[in-house]
Image (spheres, grey):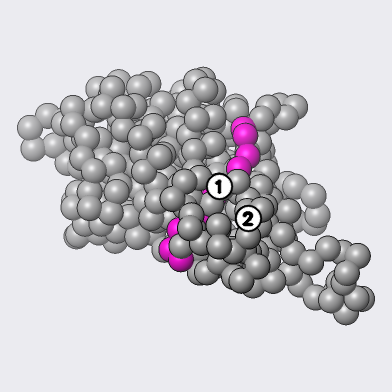
Amino acid sequence: MRLDLLRALAEAPGPPGREDRVADIVEPELRATCDRVDRDPLGSLVGVRPGPAGAPRLLLAAHMDEIGLMVTQVDDRGFVRVIPLGGWDPRTLVAQRVTVHGRRDLLGVVGTVAVHLLDEEARARPLRIEDMAVDVGLPAEEARELIRPGDVVSRVREVAEMGHLLTGKSLDDRVGVFVMLEALRAAGPARVEVHAAATVQEEVGLRGARVVAGRVRPHVGLGIETNPVDDGPGAPASGPTTRIGEGAAIRVADASAIADERVVGLLVRLAGERGIPVQFHVSARGGTDTRELQLAGDGAAAACVSVPTRYLHSSVEACHPDDVRACIALVAAFIEHAHEVVPG
Ligand SMILES: [Zn+2]
């Protein structure tokens, strides 16, 4: 596994709408495995690998963006006030190192009132993003020269090997992008036209995927994502569904999409034939680009393959390399067999 590539992808900053630094890493990788690569007006990249003449279209999608922040103002004391871009748990945001992408990149920390200065009532109150600010260590005048409203803020965190796991920020969904890129290299010839999309603005409502899917009008779709595991600390919310290290997850259902039964069946069959460990993610919450693949044009047969990931939407997301390998093998097998589930 090319850990260096995964590391570069996950460490690159890419809040929604500002994914260009991730795209700069993805584009040459897509060029190496596809006949052509298009960048659409929103910034999504789509690599195209033509199939036989008149072949149906398979659209793979993994998102490049990560949850981030956007500057609303620099206050009179130089603190940078922000709104969230995507679904933050405020408890995981405070005390983080971040980069403010202003006229140049500035190191900042997410600060809030020190515990010594909080009374009992304030300590018991849940933390809110409105109570935090990014401190870039500059007085207002200097900060305002470099930072303006609309600038974005991203987390700073390296990918590290931790026991058997990998941990870092934005494994959601750079590990999905990585799986897609590696699966394109691993897959044999396909009987479909393969469109491999690295999408933008997923975390703010699957926006990039909507445009991509509208242009490609796929017959078959496959989202490539992470999924929350409930094998971490604390009691499982609804009983364990997936566990880290036990294989690729097939995301059968979440709040955004119910996977096509034939596509799920094909994934299960291919996993059995090739000895790829799989498990199932079934949840009433969450969503992925799969929704847009499924609903585009005349509708597509779609499902999602995901890497089980702990601590999603935090700076310490963690996944197992064996699960990543299983996802790569499963997506590669699917590319070769997607023609079997073309509707109609
Ligand atoms: Zn995601």
Give residue 142's position: percent from left, percent from top.
Answer: 55, 57
- Crowding at dot 1, Cα within 10 Å, few <14 / some 14-19 / many 20+, comes out as some
Q: CA distance from mark 2 to mark 1?
A: 10 Å
Which residue matches tag 1?
A: 106
In the picture as drawn, the residue positioned furthest to the front comes out as: 141
Look at 44% across and 50% down and name the residue there: 103
Indicate yes or no whether the magenta region holds residue 9. no
The tag on residue 94 is none
Instruction: Give whichever of discs 2 and 1 has the lower sequence position.
Output: 1
**Where residue 86 sits: x, y (%)?**
51, 61
Residue 45 vertical position relative to residue 209 in the rendered view, above or below: above
Q: Image point 39% across, 47% down: which residue?
A: 19
| Drawn side of residue 94 relative to residue 303, left or right | right
Residue 287 image point, x, y percent: 48, 59
Magenta residues span 149-159
Looking at the rendered structure, the kind of residue marked 1 is Leu
Q: Secondary structure at mark 2?
A: loop
Instruction: Identify residue type, mark 2.
Output: Leu
Crowding around mark 2 (Cα neighbors within 10 Å: few <14, some 14 to 19, many 20+) is few
* Dominant secondary-structure state across the stretch colored magenta: loop
Q: Nearer the viewer, mark 2 or mark 1?
A: 2
Residue at 63%, 60% (x, y): give it.
Answer: 139
Residue 98 image position (x, y, % from top left): 61, 49
In this rendering, position of residue 84 left or right of residue 110: left
User: Which residue is more in the foreground, 229 or 43?
Assistant: 43
Q: Residue 90 occupies which quadrant of the picture?
A: bottom right
Q: Identify the disc placed on residue 138.
A: 2
**Farthest bottom residue?**
121
Q: Which residue is pictured at 60% across the width and 28% down the height? A: 321
- In the rendered structure, are the residues bearing label 2 and label 1 in contact, judged by CB atoms less than 8 Å apart? yes
